[in-house]
Amino acid sequence: MTIKEIIKILPYESPFHFVDGLSAISDDGVTGHYTFKETEFFYAGHFKENPITPGVILTECMAQIGLVCLGIYLMRAELSDDFKPQIALTSSQVDFFLPVFPGEKVSVISEKEVFRFNKLKCKVKLFNEKNELICRGTISGMLKPNTHD
Amino acid sequence: MKKEELIAKLKTIVQPYIQDEEAFKNLTEETTFVGDLKINSANLVDVILDVEDEFDIRIENDEMERMLSVKAAMEIVTSKIAKE
């Protein structure tokens, strides 16, 4: 399964699509990136006249790259024309160290901890362009191929 | 392993994941994980993984699907321990 195919299958759309590309993927983990555009919708309100990327959005970016992209790859054997991944975030524990400003590019590195009985749990880190750690944590979700029935 | 001992161990394992305190307090063999204890699907996987660690066994997909109640969990664990 190619990186292009994974990104095409992602069930997200602007303004809630936080994956630009993946640079590596394997059964053990994934590395990907996203650049926060200055026009992202949340900068209008977070914060008043002081745009900073919300932690929940950083968590979402980590989950979309680290959990969902990896999950699609791990489920590739079950891929079919009807394949639509069914996804639910089930837990996240994230510590934040540095802010991310409009226009910054971030990289996500995710390592698989467990993938069993449709539950994927990953250790995920997010870095800025200077390779400084922005945030890190553990994110879990349930992933199932959803054939139309 | 005695039945009471097994139930006590299972009780300790499920405790962090339960939502329904009342059902947990009154836990019996007939108690179901999702219906009664209101454990979510992701935490049910955690229960299974913790059961594997506690009893040093490996649970397969079909067994996971059958493991809906305390009773079913006890049966699966008991049969696995016997095989070791």
Image (cartoon, coloured by chain):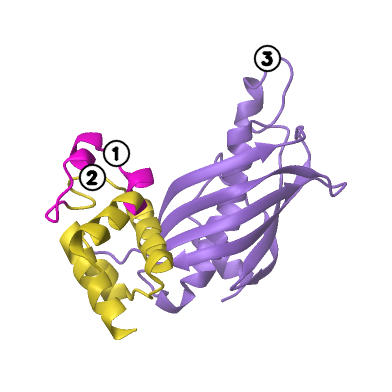
Chain colours: A purple, B yellow
- Give the magenta range: B13-31
Residue highlighted by disc 3: A48
Is residue A47 a member of the stretch shown in magenta?
Answer: no
Residue closest to the eye, B65 or B51: B51
Which label was assigned to residue B37?
2
Count neighbours of disc 2 (C-alpha within 10 A) and say few if under 14, some if 14 to 19, many if 20 or more: many
At horizontal 61% and vertical 28% (from top left) the residue drawn is A42
The residue positioned 29% from the left and 39% from the top of the image is B19
Residue A85 falls in image quadrant: bottom left
A105 sits to left or right of A147: right
Q: What is the quadrant of residue B15 in the picture?
A: top left
Dot 1 alpha-carbon crowd within 10 angstroms: few under 14, some 14 to 19, many 20 or more: some
Indicate the quadrant containing the N terminus of chain A: top left, top right, bottom left or bottom right.
bottom right
Q: Is residue A46 above or below residue B78?
A: above
Q: CA distance from mark 1 to mark 3?
A: 38 Å
Q: Which residue type does callout 2 highlight?
A: Leu
* Labels 3 and 2 positioned on one and the same chain: no
Kindly report the distance in space between the C-alpha atoms of the residues bearing marks 1 and 2: 6 Å
- Pair 3/2: label in front: 2
Q: Are marks 1 and 2 in contact (CB under 8 Å)?
A: yes
Kind of residue sitting beneath label 3: Lys
Task: From the top left corner, tell me how far across and down residue A51 is, in percent.
Answer: 72, 24
**Which residue is disc 1 drawn over?**
B19
Q: What label does residue A149 carry, if any?
A: none
* Nearer to us in this view, A1 or A115: A115
**Disc 1 is attached to a residue of which chain?**
B
- Asked if badges 1 and 2 are on one and the same chain, I answer yes
Q: Is residue A86 above or below residue A39?
A: below
Would residue A128 appear left or right of B75 to someone viewing this image?
A: right
- The quarter of the rendered structure image containing the C terminus of chain A is bottom left
**Residue A57: x and y, percent?**
60, 37
Identify the residue at horizontal 26%, vertical 59% (top origin).
B5
